[in-house]
Amino acid sequence: MTIDPDGRARQVLRDVTGSCYTGASVPLEHRSVAKAEFGAWTAYVDAEVLGLSGPITLVPARGTVDGPAPGTMPAWSAPLPLRPRHLEALFTPGSRLASDDGRVALITEPSHAGWLHLPTGSVIAADPYLLGDSGPFTVTVAPGDYAVLIASMRWEGTDWEGETPAAMVRILDKPTVSWALALLPGQDVRLLGADEFFGFGVDAGMGCFLDASGRDEFERLIEEWEEESDQEVDLLSSEVRAPETGTNLIAYQSGLGDGSYPVWIGRDTSGEVTSFVADMLILHDADALPPTVPSTAVCLPLFTPVTDDRREAPFTSPSATAEYMAAQISHVADDWAESRHSFTNSRVLRNR
């Protein structure tokens, strides 16, 4: 069982025939334990939580050394969410990136896809056919028209262009010194596990940028275009403008197709937004080759403030939480056994 700080839980039961996944909402009192005073870490030691019986006696460790002992794994560290890589290189012609499959991508001149009209300065990145599920990022910019650049590449040794590695809304023509993950209201990067990210989902093989004021109108227009075959619009080769709001939508191919993609916000030395970059993750794990200029920009974590400090609030005991978790695991195990029994019976009936 995995419990996130916001109360979401995932339970997984595995056996030789497959896995069973269920979700649950964990009560607040079972999501965490009381924060111990500085240095009093032994308050977290509880036999039942650790799956042991009887009291635990703590004794000083013998032969302690600085750092991990020879032949042991490195010390544990907190998992880091996905970090941006090569974002500047994706828009710098001549950059070379070696993918993990042995191919080398040569970055070519980015294409200018048009000027994005942002009357409110609230940016949306989404699949143009899933606008109803999208929303604007928490970071806004001054209203205006901004260039949209589509990164281009080709695989060395071939004469055909490769996939679209990234797309950018360029706000300021200044060097970017820091990147941060673009977030929607309510998203908290502290809930992300190792290499996880908040991104926009793609189901039509394309992404787009638009102003929040045009979302509802574009959603309606695209539905109408889908219903009327004689008014189909190629979203990838023409600028689409909403007649009522005057906003436009600029679409691009989403890398390798459907999936989920992060958007990074760049800032200059004064903290002003320089760009929004949708990374298609094609070259995220690639290694930079000469003459690629290494990035000096840093990735900034975005932590939302903690508004409910529970140190003074009542807590249940660790043993009570352990009992709760055991009951939940038993429940999902019973459901799994019942579902397997039902499946076996139905299979027997079909065979008969």
Image (tube, rainbow, N blue to C red):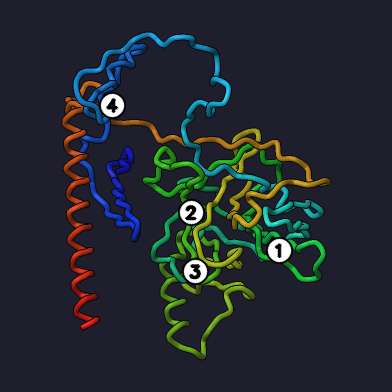
Quadrant including the N terminus: top left
Give the number of the disc on residue 92. Answer: none
Find the residue positioned furthest to the bottom: 230
Query: Label 2, label 4: how many angstroms apart (C-alpha)?
Result: 29 Å
Q: Which residue corresponds to mark 2? A: 199
| Residue type, label 3 | Pro
User: In front of the other: label 1 or label 2?
Assistant: 2
Toward which corner of the image does residue 305 lie, by quadrant? top left
Alpha carbons under labels 3 and 1: distance apart: 19 Å
Instruction: Identify the residue under disc 1.
Output: 112
- Which residue has dot 4 on it? 309
The amino acid pointed to by label 4 is Asp
Disc 2 is placed on an element classified as strand
Spatial CA distance of label 1 from label 4 is: 48 Å
- Depth check, mark 2 against mark 3: the one in front is 2
Residue at disc 3, secondary structure: loop
Q: In this view, does 264 lie to the left or right of 93?
A: left
Residue 319 point in image, percent of width and height:
18, 28
In this rendered view, identify the residue nearer to me: 161 or 225: 161
Nearest the camera: 298 or 185?
Answer: 298
Q: Is residue 265 above or below residue 34?
A: below
Return the disc, 1 or 2, that comes first in the chain's sequence: 1
Residue 152 is situated, as x and y percent measured from the top left of the image, at: 72, 62
Amino acid at dot 1: His
What amino acid is at disc 2? Answer: Gly
Q: Earlier in the sequence, mark 2 or mark 4?
A: 2
Disc 3/disc 4 C-alpha distance (Å): 40 Å
- Residue 156: image quadrant is bottom right
**Residue on which disc 3 sits:** 128
